[in-house]
Amino acid sequence: MLRHPALLLGALALLTLGAAPPQHSVQMYVGPSQMLLVDADTVLVLESREWQAASVRHQEKLLRLALRMQYWRNHIPPDMRMVYDELGYPTGRVLLTPVGHTEEHWYYGQLDPPLVFRDGELQNPDLFERYTQP
């Protein structure tokens, strides 16, 4: 199992001491290879090196990826949901943060122009219509 659990717990203590005091109740889940802190606004994951090692089974890593994908699917804005339902997960995503906004570029082909979302709203619906036409 873990060789140095004291280092992991020390890192967790420093993480919780350095953060601002939460206004809401904080839940903590402790598993064999990670700790998860859940607040009303934040999800923090603290992983051990063992999780990243080659000895961890691939099924566990795929399960974690599946959980992240499920969370992502359930928490996206309506325009992104519409594009996701119609075209599926993009082959490439670029996240940008211009001043005061959040921008995402979704690529559905290597040389095709991306669908651009700004603050969750689709900026080029004509391109989306072109992608959905046969």
Image (spheres, rainbow, N blue to C red):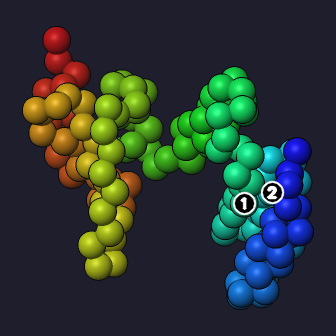
Q: Position of residue 77 (x, y in %)?
A: 46, 49
Q: In which quadrant is the C terminus drawn?
A: top left
Q: Which residue is mark 1?
A: 46
56 versus 15 height, above or below: above
Asked if disc 2 and disc 1 are in contact, CB closer than 8 Å, the reply is yes
Q: In which quadrant is the N terminus drawn?
A: top right
**In the displayed structure, does residue 1 sit left or right of residue 12?**
right
**In the displayed structure, does residue 96 sit left or right of residue 4?**
left
Q: Earlier in the sequence, mark 2 or mark 1?
A: 2
Q: Residue at x 13, y 27 (%)?
A: 130
Residue 86 lies in quadrant: top left
- Circle 1 SS class: strand
Estimate the spatial distance between the alpha carbons at disc 2 and disc 1, rounded to whole Å.
5 Å
23 versus 3 height, above or below: below
Label 2 crowding class (10 Å Cα cut-off): few <14, some 14-19, many 20+?
some
Q: Any mark on residue 35, and which? A: 2
Residue 56 lies in quadrant: top right
Name the amino acid, label 1.
Leu
Q: Residue at x 37, y 44 (%)?
A: 79
